[in-house]
Amino acid sequence: MDYKDTLNLPHTDFPMKANLAKREPEMLSRWDGMHIYDLIRRTSKGRKPYILHDGPPYANGSIHLGTALNKIIKDVLVKAKNMAGYDSIYVPGWDCHGLPIEHQVDKELGEKKGTLSQTEKRRCCRQYAERYVGIQREQFQRLGVFGEWDNPYLTMSYDYEAATVAELGKLYLGGGVYKGKKPVYWCASCKTALAEAEVEYQDHSTPSIYVKFPAVSDVSARLPKLAGEQVSVVIWTTTPWTIPANLAVALHADFIYVALKIKGEVLIIARELLENCLDAFGFRNEPYENLDEFPGSVLEGLKFCHPIIDRESLLIIAPFVTLDTGTGCVHIAPGHGQEDYEIGMKYGLENYAPVDDDGKFTADVKDFAGQFVFSANDAVIEKLKGAGALLGRVDIKHTYPHCWRCKNPIIFRSTEQWFVSMEKNDLRKKTLQAIDNVKWIPAWGRDRIYGMIENRPDWCISRQRLWGVPITVFTCKKCGEQLLNQPIIDNLVALVRQFGADVWFEREAKELLPAGCVCPQCGGDDFKKETDILDVWFDSGVSHAAVLEGRDYLSSPADMYLEGNDQHRGWFHSSLLESVASRGRAPYRNVLTHGFVVDGEGKKMSKSVGNVTDPQKIIDGYGAEILRLWVASADYTEDIRVSDEILKRLVEAYRRIRNTSRFILGNISDFQPDADGVPYEDMEEMDRWILHRLHEVIRRVREAYELYQFHLVYTTLYNFCTVDLSSLYLDVLKDRLYTSKAASRRRRSGQTAMHEILEAMARLLAPILTFTAEEIWLALPERPGKQESVHLTQFPEVDSAKLQPELGEKWKKLIAVKGEIARAIETARQNKVVGHSLDAAALIAAPDDIRPLLQGNLDDLRAFLIVSAVDVVGAVAVENGYPSSEIPGLCIGVSRAKGVKCERCWNYSETVGGSAEHPTLCTRCVKNL
Ligand SMILES: [Zn+2]
Ligand SMILES: [Zn+2]
Ligand SMILES: [Zn+2]
């Protein structure tokens, strides 16, 4: 007789091999068929809503690992909130307007682009964005992300554009929007102003020069010691091309400057920088005389002479002058720098920037007119040299702002732009207050955005481009008065809702205004449309109005905004400003940020370095589930590493979770929970112990989800799977499961525990292992009321009756003893005393404090230790014993078990041969047949 057939060996169709790349799409189509997102929402109806508002990715190109990371974190959170008892809603969105798309369309159109009308080109941009919304939508869905994919929000949809126009109108009428000439970041290749968030800092080489400005005023009136001398102040700059726009030289009021007589003339520089300057000028070996020393304030208001242009340069005092480098005398061009502009305003200087949209000098600058500013550096330097004004030149490398799009260095240039004022209506102050009503996770996010709002200039919201929402302001052609009021806005909003923002470009001003509109200033009725469009950050910044307030099942403020930590200056920032300006409060209650994807060495991913990992490759190779596991396994508050090695480790971790689940499924295949389940109080003690551990795990995992610490969810579940279950509980349980009678209470007790464990684990894992949890769920025994998807269930509740701390403590001790015995058996195995653990008999000499515990659980202990026999004695000497170093007084003797190996259960027993019918079996097995 083959006794193998009498064992209850595991049986399941649940495949060992995950084959995720093939199985996931099948699961997706199953969910698609059952409309899983709608079902979840229907199930959650009436519960407290939880709104995670999606920050819109840009509809350009395929998703990369960073976008995948962001979407997966959001999805884990949305699913976890649903399973924790909320009605958790996720409406995905896309950012569709803006320069990058316009750029791509220009590129695709090539020569043809010049022949298209504005509307035709906008149509091309819209089609381009639609194409990528489609592509990205599929890619996000492939990740197992649930949401309202058939009704996302698009910043280019007519409704959304109408909401944007309405929001701009609100801010305009509130008095917070103005048109002014101000220096802005300007990309000459893209011909547009750029926002702070659109600027990247990279190394850039420029000549730095030292230039003399001779005095026009009589300096000796203030400094008599300089009477009769030719006096010059010396500036230092790294942007020679801005010299033609120089209007002033700034000194610090309190720094000490010296009047240095050298080579027959007097130079004014900061005392502390004297040595550096002598080197830079090549004057190291020249004899000099220090005629006078004085604080910078002494010279305020004197006039100096521009070195190459017939114009005066005013000596002013500025707080931002430093002694780090240069001369302590700062060249001021108010049209080409933010600080220069601000200090220039104070001294009534003109906001002068003789540079056009192409970055070329205007005719105003005779010598360099038509030259591109960066190319003009050398010409400016030559001209200074010719005028005898150049004291020194040193080429330096420094970090300099570059355009995010075309990667070219940009300039600071004064132009007419539209701004949202930070000071009018106290926007800055109110925004800073609003920040403290938001919970920032991690907490340093609060300080980061606070610092940014505290120091930022007015928000430049205009762009000189085409693909966006127009700045819908009219100007009277006759008197130049701006025209916008509520009836005009209402009229426009209705038009845009019907025809899209294209209507602004298609129709004349007259057709866009309510009938009979006249200029309140001069009575004129001929108006000009503004040609600038809005900054895309304004577009996405109004999503709280367009989406959260625009859909009746959503509301503002949202519970959560969740993006990469660069968004403190991006979407969090613009959304906050717009919402405070229009509604006096933040559009969110919580802001959660994550770090960025870096390679295995912690380096930023870049195409040029060649260390970019494509998410599609991971999906095709391992499955989206591994990508999800990767996201969940990392502490995303830091940068997150990815490499082949990391992925392989995760595949291995996944395999262990899967195999543990499969083992349980195999062992409960003949178990009907409702008919066969054993009541808790009748369960074996070890089974009650593992349920105690399970409920500890449930408590911990639910807490970790609540605190958005998904990596703790993962480690807790992974450790439970591998440590508690796989290498302990299930390993020990095998003997009972396989050899007991199929329907015996002892076996059913184990099955009851295993079923509860796997059912709970599937639910706890579902937000992360979205596909596999469902696969497990479907493989669990059918029972009345079992939901058709794990995603329609709730997290298991912590059952306090099953939390048995005393049992936990007791088994902790047993586990410690088991560890020591395993070591003793390992030693015996090395000494060839035994082969397999079941060959062994253990004689345990235990100290008084744990002996009763061991003696009282002898039967469990034998199974637990996976040995054939176990005996516990007092603290006596054990021959050839293994003395424990961990547990004082514990000593374990290992010998070959007595008796014969039972053919069925492989335990050694002296009872083998006791049955005539089954001579090769032990008594226990004979009874279990
Ligand atoms: Zn550019
Ligand atoms: Zn007018
Ligand atoms: Zn047996």
Image (cartoon, rainbow, N blue to C red):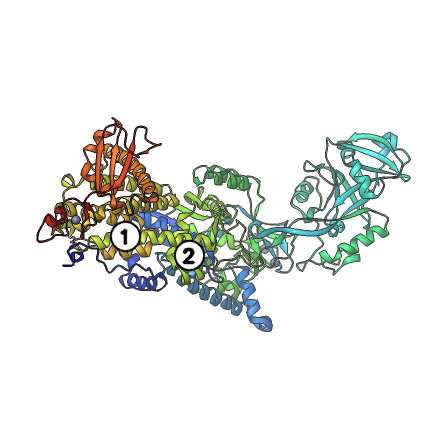
- Check whether the beta carbons of the residues at disc 1 and disc 2 lie within 8 A of each other: no
Give whichever of discs 1 and 2 has the lower sequence position. 2
The N terminus, quarter of image:
bottom left
In-front residue for pair 630/48: 630
Residue 266 vs residue 691, the one in the foreground: 691
Which residue position is annotated with label 2? 93
Percent x, y of residue 742: 14, 52
Would residue 798 be seen by someone viewing this image from the given angle?
no
Provide the residue designation for mark 1.
Answer: 661
Report the side of 254 relative to 489 (left or right): right
Figure quadrant of residue 798: top left
Image location of residue 908, percent across then percent down? 20, 46
Say which amino acid is labelled 2. Gly
Please, what secondary structure does the residue beneath circle 2 have? strand
Q: Residue at x 38, y 61 (%)?
A: 142
Q: Is residue 652 visible?
A: yes
